[in-house]
Image (cartoon, rainbow, N blue to C red):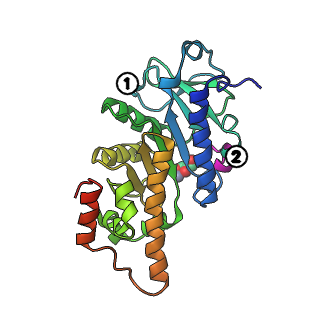
Amino acid sequence: MKSILDNREVLAKKVYDVAEVAGYLWQKGWAERNGGNITINITDQVDDEIRAMKAIAEPVAIGATLPHLKGCYFYCKGTNRRMRDLARDPMANGSVIRILDDCAHYEIIADAPVKPTSELPSHLSVHNYLIAKGSTYKASVHTHPISLVAMSHNPWFLEKDVLTNLLWSMIPETKAFCPRGLGIVPYMLPSSVELADATIKAIDDNYDVVMWEKHGVFAVGEDVMEAFDMIDVLDKSAHIYIDAKSMGFTPDGMSQEQMNEISTVFHLPK
Ligand code: 2HA
Ligand code: ZN
């Protein structure tokens, strides 16, 4: 079957990176059924031939007007599609969409008429925000990491930066590779505009990874691997905390002095 990825090496690599991450999310147990979504901004990989491609489905309202997305293109996981299926066949379980000039509708241009993720309004609102800020970030990942979500059921962990500092202190790598920590968004209805707005507010507060209380996390990054890696190091720390707790003790965590040393050596904010 003909694919938009044919003879487009860079675009194909980006989509196959999404597929690779989708496989990791499934293997980690973070992607039950259709859980989670991934979108990547592929506008830079779009050539004249793609720009001229006809839509393969009727335009659909985004549910918001997003002025910075005019003429942008995204690869999006399909709604109700499984990460484990996307890992095998990304163009049958996701699609390429074009944002129309009214900035309020999208149309699917390839490869199959797979309707994008239920969290499309929040993903696209975040991409709109990132472009407006002049950010170079192109990827957003939403997933349901078990240990991090478990920790979000304790209100004490939801105070600003309590979880950030605790997770950073479990292993030196966590602050080094997730230097902005973990923002917190209180529980809100999945797919709601309120959740999208609160997520943008947290990203604007300088977090790259945001916890959606009792639901999952939302991460942004230069590419899908970077977004995944930040979630992965945070969840690793959550595992270490929980393992220590299940052995019957509360882990000491690295001391403030040790944390400061890491920050100095890795040139991280203190
Ligand atoms: O797409 O995870 O939050 C399934 C979800 C919605
Ligand atoms: Zn979810």
- In reply to whether residue 81 is colored magenta, the answer given is yes
Q: Residue at point 47% right, 65% down?
A: 236
- On-image quarter of the C terminus: bottom left
The residue nearer to you, when weighing 56 against 132, is 132
Residue 101's spot in the image, x, y percent?
45, 17
Magenta segment boundaries in residue numbering: 79-86
Binning the other alpha carbons within 10 Å of mark 2 as few (below 14), some (14 to 19) or many (20 upward) gives: some
Among numbered discs 1 and 2, the one appearing first in the sequence: 1
- Would you say residue 9 is visible in this rendering? yes
Q: As drawn, is 179 to the left or to the right of 90? A: left
Q: Amino acid at mark 1?
A: Pro
Task: Name the residue tied to disc 1.
Answer: 67
Task: Name the residue tied to disc 2.
Answer: 85
- On-image quarter of the N terminus: top right
Residue 69's spot in the image, x, y percent?
42, 25
Q: Secondary structure at mark 2?
A: helix
> Which residue of the protein is positioned furthest toward the front in this rendering?
265
Binning the other alpha carbons within 10 Å of mark 1 as few (below 14), some (14 to 19) or many (20 upward) gives: some
Give the number of the disc on residue 169.
none
Q: Is mark 2 within 8 Å of ligand 1?
A: no
Q: Amino acid at mark 2?
A: Asp
Q: CA distance from mark 1 to mark 2?
A: 33 Å
The residue nearer to you, when weighing 186 against 138, is 138
Residue 223's spot in the image, x, y percent?
47, 40
Q: Residue at point 26% right, 53% down?
A: 267
Disc 1, disc 2: CB below 8 Å? no
Q: Secondary structure at mark 1?
A: helix
> Which residue of the protein is positioned furthest toward the bottom in this rendering?
248
Image position of 187 with respect to 73: above or below: below
The residue nearer to you, when weighing 190 against 21, is 21
